Image (cartoon, helix red, strand yellow):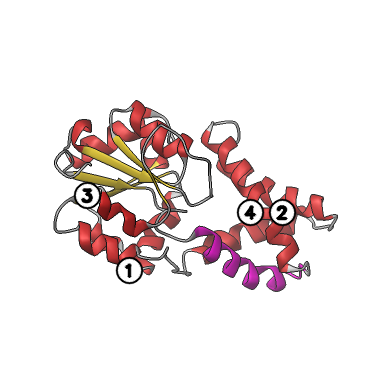
């Protein structure tokens, strides 16, 4: 579908290539006991996973700062669970989480397989809303940094997806016109609608079991990208 139209493929990182939920859970398994927080991991993650998505949406919409995101997503979980944790412990957990997270390297199934398939045919890049200081570490530690020519993050751009500015910056850095570029990501709002607004093609990796839509083709596994490229 995009094979004869596209020269450059832009990937989201978290929830698309890098398995955020699995790596995040492994991080919490280490840091919660380390800081004396004795909540059942299953209970913690059941509340944290959806809460994190909510606070990331607020951050993406410029309604909270990075510091507020890091604090509030943890504070809200402990409040929901009725578990008393001091602010100093929450801040220490938030810092430790960022320091530890990129040391875990689980990727989604077929990540390496599809990157190896695409690399000889297309220029590959990353556009991420993740924090600059850890996204590079994630790429390096998980062994996929060398696949990508450009890595554009929201702190570099000064805005977050779906703002067209970050997509335009990515196109400029990659030296490609939007009509020859494809965005692949898990977020309908940030990746798909954002990319289309900036003139890119889009392919939705449905990592969250969302309903079908007409905004772009949708895939359930990364190897399905081969159907389109």
* Above/below status of 25 relative to 167: below
Looking at the image, residue 84 sits to the left or right of residue 183; the answer is right
- Residue for badge 2: 47
Q: Secondary structure at mark 2?
A: helix
The secondary structure making up most of the magenta span is helix
Point out residue 227 in the picture as x, y percentages from the top left corner. Answer: 26, 52
Q: Residue at x 32, y 28 (%)?
A: 198
Quadrant of the rendered image containing residue 89: bottom right
Badge 3 crowding class, 10 Å Cα cut-off, few under 14, some 14 to 19, many 20 or more, is some
- Which residue was labeled with disc 4? 49
SS for callout 1: loop
| The magenta stretch spans residue 26 | yes
Label 1 vs 3, first from the N-terminus: 1
x then y, percent, for residue 84: 84, 57
Crowd class of label 1 (few under 14; some 14 to 19; many from 20; radius 10 Å) = few
Cβ atoms under marks 4 and 1 closer than 8 Å: no
Q: Residue at x 68, y 45 (%)?
A: 72
Quadrant housing the N terminus? top left
Mark-to-mark CA distance, 1 and 3: 23 Å
**Which disc number belongs to residue 229?**
3
Q: Which mark is residue 143?
A: 1
Determine which quarter of the picture holds residue 10.
top left
Mark 4 vs mark 1: give the one in front.
Answer: 4
**Span of residues in magenta:** 20-37
> Splitting the image into 4 quarters, where does residue 46 fall?
bottom right
* Percent position of residue 143, x then y: 32, 68
Circles 2 and 4, Cβ within 8 Å, touching? The answer is yes
């Amino acid at each position: 579908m995009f094979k004869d139209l596209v020269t450059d493929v832009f990937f989201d990182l978290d929830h698309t290539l890098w398995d955020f939920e699995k790596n995040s859970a492994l991080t919490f398994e280490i840091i919660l006991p380390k800081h004396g927080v004795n909540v059942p991991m299953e209970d913690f993650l059941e509340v944290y996973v959806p809460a994190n998505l909510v606070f990331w949406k607020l951050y993406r919409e410029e309604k909270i700062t990075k510091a507020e995101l890091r604090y509030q997503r943890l504070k809200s979980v402990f409040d929901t669970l009725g578990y008393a944790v001091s602010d100093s412990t929450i801040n220490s957990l938030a810092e430790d989480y960022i320091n530890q997270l990129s040391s875990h390297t689980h990727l989604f199934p077929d990540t390496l397989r599809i990157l190896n398939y695409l690399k000889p045919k297309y220029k590959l890049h990353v556009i991420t809303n993740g924090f600059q200081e850890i996204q590079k570490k994630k790429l390096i530690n998980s062994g996929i940094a060398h696949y990508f020519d450009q890595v554009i993050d929201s702190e570099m751009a000064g805005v977050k997806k779906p703002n067209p500015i970050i997509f335009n910056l990515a196109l400029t850095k990659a030296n490609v016109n939007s009509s020859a570029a494809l965005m692949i990501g898990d977020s309908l709002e940030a990746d798909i609608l954002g990319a289309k607004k900036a003139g890119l093609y889009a392919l939705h990796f449905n990592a969250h079991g969302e309903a079908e839509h007409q905004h772009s083709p949708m895939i359930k596994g990364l190897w399905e990208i081969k159907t389109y490229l």
